[in-house]
Amino acid sequence: MAPLRRKPEKIAEQEPLTIEVGDGAAIPRRKDAGMFTAWRVAFFGAIAMVLYLILFTPDPYRNIIAFVPDGIWVTFKVTVGAILLALVIGLFAGLGRLAENRVINGIASLYVEVIRGIPLLVQLFYIYYALGRIVNIPAITSAIIAMAVCYGAYMGEIFRAGIQSIPKGQMEAARSLGMNKSQAMVHVILPQAVTVILPPIGNEFVALLKDSSLVSILAVADLLRRGREFASETFTYFETYTLVALVYLIITLFFSKLVSIMEERISAGK
């Protein structure tokens, strides 16, 4: 009698892993114990280092910290202004990428591809001088527009992915209730997509905050520019850039933690 042969078991197909890589700071999630510990060490260590330098080496560190606060304010103005404008541009770009109209889809896709293929520094120079030939606008406005145009392309892809993550049945259900496509998108799809896109938008905010240091080349008196001005007057380059780096680190880590808290609350609310 021939031996019974077992049928080969089907190997369960594994879902492809998603690799998250961004330009911003690493987000300290509690499930990643190593990163969470590293965030605490870096954040509180940077604060302790700044306090130590100011208290025990007041000259020049106390003078530096008194010289740059207005630069920190300008950095926040550029970052917030650029991210708000980038959200508007990104929304239209994302909707354009999903449009059935081939012309609109092509324009949005071309914008995303071209902008993402040009370095931000080149875009800053180009938009600053190109706008300067047409209309005389402040350097800080040029910087905000340039950074918004650049990050709007990335925001467009975030919006596109967020909208596509909503099940198609939601659109069909909204249409069955008598809504047209625009109404369904505004009242049904976008409110659900917001919870999906908020964490990556937070990551882009942190990345933009770091990239805002590039606007110093346009004579915008941000944190880095103010540090350069102090260093050129006192020739304390090492001390100045050390403190500027620590301030950037503290600000970046602070906002990366806020993004982490936002992600946890969104996940808990699902």
Image (cartoon, grey):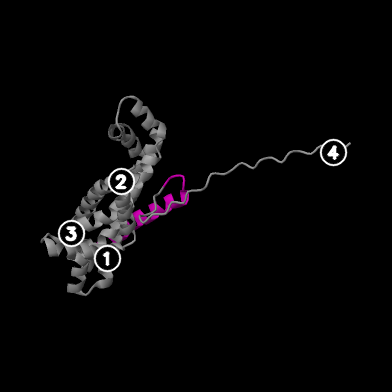
Give the side of residue 190 with respect to residue 58, left or right.
right
Residue identifier under label 1? 122
Direction front: furthest residue: 102
First to last magenta residue range: 29-54
Q: Quadrant of residue 132?
A: bottom left
Q: Which numbered mark, 4 or 2, is in the foreground of this view?
A: 2
- Does the magenta stretch mainly form a helix, a strand or a loop? helix
Q: Which numbered mark, 2 or 3, is in the foreground of this view?
A: 2
Residue identifier under label 3? 142
Q: Amino acid at mark 2?
A: Gly
- Which numbered dot is residue 3? 4
- Where residue 21 sits in the image (x, y, percent)? 42, 54
Reply above or below: 236 against 142.
Answer: below
Check disc 1: other Cα within 10 Å, few if <14, some if 14-19, many if 20+. Answer: few
Quadrant holding the C terminus: top left
Query: Residue sitting at 53 percent across and 44 percent down?
Result: 15
Query: Residue sitting at 66 percent across and 40 percent down?
Result: 10
In the image, residue 168 lies in the stretch drawn in magenta: no
Q: Amino acid at mark 3?
A: Ser
Question: How many angstroms separate mark 3 from mark 1 (CA)?
Answer: 13 Å
Q: Quadrant of residue 212?
A: bottom left
